[in-house]
Amino acid sequence: MSDVPGALPHWDLTVVYPDVDSDAFRAAYADMAARIDNLEALFDRHDIGRQPATAVGKDLVGSFETVVQQLNELLERSRTMYAYLFGHIATDSRDERAQAKWSEYQQLRVKLVLIERRFVAWIGALDVDGLIERSSLAQAHAFALRVAQQAAAHLLPSEQEALVADLDLVAGKAWAKLHGAFTSQLTVPVEIEGEVRQLPMSAVRNLASSPEREVRRRAYEAELATWERAEVPLAAAMNGIKGQVDLVARRRGWASVLDEALFAGRIDRATLDAMMEAAWDSFPDFQRYLRAKARLLDLPVLGWYDLFAPVGTDQRQWRFVEASSFVIEQFGSYSARLADLAERAFSERWIDAEPRDGKRDGAFCMWIQGDASRVLANYRPVYGGVSTLAHELGHAYHNLNLSRRTMLQRDTPMTMAETASIFCETIVRHAALAEATPEQQLTILEAALQGACQVVVDISSRFLFEQRTFEQRRARELSARELCALMEQAQRETYGDGLDQDVLHRYMWAVKPHYYSTSRSFYNYPYMFGLLFGLGLYARYQETPEAFRAEYDDLLASTGMAAPAELAARFGIELSTPDFWRSSLDIVRADIDRFETLANELSR
């Protein structure tokens, strides 16, 4: 494979449907619509969610098993439809055909959401323990049923839930769509080699890794100036979404949006507090890393635009074909099954790697059908690009293990969603370090610490920002200036003297799409949970490799079937005290120590 920019791979969605205008797609869409109507009719026939629940007898068990089977099938078809359409608009927001189909799908999805909520309300009124005793299918879905029973206590009456779902389509989701489409089409005028060029926002943000500080500075200033010009609609979107989410959460009886998010993450406040306490304790160590990086760059202190600057004299260029071979090889050091997954992903075009106009920034992995996923990346030929591929393919491996479960059994909380990705990223990093020169080790450690700093320190700043935004939004709308001030204050508190306090990123609230969702508030702290849990699991793997391998795939296959605390206990991990989280951060501290040592040796 050539690594000319235009030759970086685009993913293949035609294995699902040939085209959004194809007969196959139209037939699948019509079939899904009919299945939704049929399931709604089935609910009506069995009075599901509309009449008081009856005793758990043969008839009720039969109704339950019929409903669950059909609901699982429908959710799977809907998820494939979602991934197919989102795959089109995530890589080309100007694709009007896909955008139109996406809008139609969203309206159809509202009907399915209402069916799901009606199902949850029904389960909440049942004798769940009695049902589990009488039905093997209920027993197989026991965790999902108990979660539904708890969720039912926070549902509004059915008519109000229907109104919330309908309004979400024209309110919150519309604001989110605006953010996604608007930001993916932003172009930034930036001077490069004496010439002002109009570049996609994703390409300009990639300039943050340029070895030339002047390029990084100009890109940063041009980026912020562009966000400032775009701030009015983005602030409106933020206010609309946060206002809606807070209002609905309160109407549903949640004490706060964070409490609702913790329930969705399947953890309690004690676990969150323990993790955050350990994180705050680690900030001086991350600030030590940032100061060491500043010395390597011969700077008194890092500015925001220096966070992703490369360090070291040996900057290996990782062509995409080299990166793919290396990832496959190192995955093979863990297991043939993991290596086979990576081989399929590269050979079957699961990956969209080329940055381009209209494509979303960042990276993600989504399940699409069967045991297959799709990975979006904006590949850069540096070690960080390799690490991102390994990370996202870890998600694909998680999806592979979940593929033997039903959709209700696959409902993995965000807290557990990073488990395999961090593990796979760590496999590749350790392998890269083992064969690297001291100069290359510095570069690899920098990439790892850069990522850890983002997930622990920057995520903490984003958590603070979101928490304070919700608190203040309850009283009134916030201006773009106020959102910028909240973001900068959160960055000052977390980065401390590791960064120039006058050169921060006040528009990070505009950058991150996670803020613009009505269904995933506080999308940030689960990444920290995932990093530290994944590192803790990797430490267990190093201690007892064979025993770990025997249990790990089943853990990944069970992330929707048990709470994180129960799954962690399988490996002797206690989540509700700071000790485990500190032990995981000790692994990061060791990398910081090694980074400092190498930096001192190489700068003599």
Image (cartoon, rainbow, N blue to C red):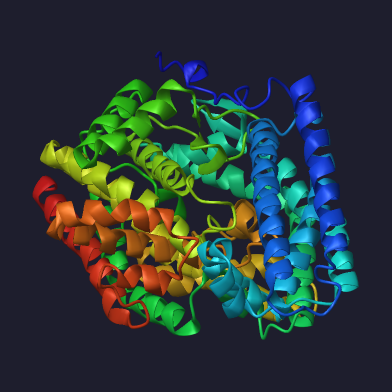
Residue 588, located in which quarter of the rendered image? bottom left
User: Going by the picture, which residue comes out furthest to the top?
Assistant: 2
Which quarter of the image is occupied by the N terminus? top left
In percent of the image, x 52 and y 44: which residue is there? 364
> Number of labelled discs?
0
Image location of residue 507, percent across then percent down: 61, 57
Image location of residue 542, percent across then percent down: 16, 56
Tell me: residue 549, above or below residue 443.
below
Front one among 551 and 218: 551
In percent of the image, x 25 and y 45: which residue is there? 427
Residue 453, located in which quarter of the rendered image? bottom left
In percent of the image, x 63 and y 52: which residue is there? 513
Residue 187, located in which quarter of the rendered image? top right
Q: Is residue 568 left or right of residue 171?
A: left
Whether residue 261 is visible to the viewer of this picture, yes or no, is no
Front one among 415 and 588: 415
Q: Is residue 297 left or right of residue 57?
A: left
Whether residue 584 is visible to the viewer of this picture, yes or no, is yes
Tell me: residue 339, above or below residue 589.
above
Q: Is residue 146 left or right of residue 179?
A: left
Image location of residue 279, percent across then percent down: 36, 73
In percent of the image, x 36 and y 32: which residue is there? 342
Tell me: residue 526, above or below residue 390.
below
Q: Is residue 386 left or right of residue 192?
A: left
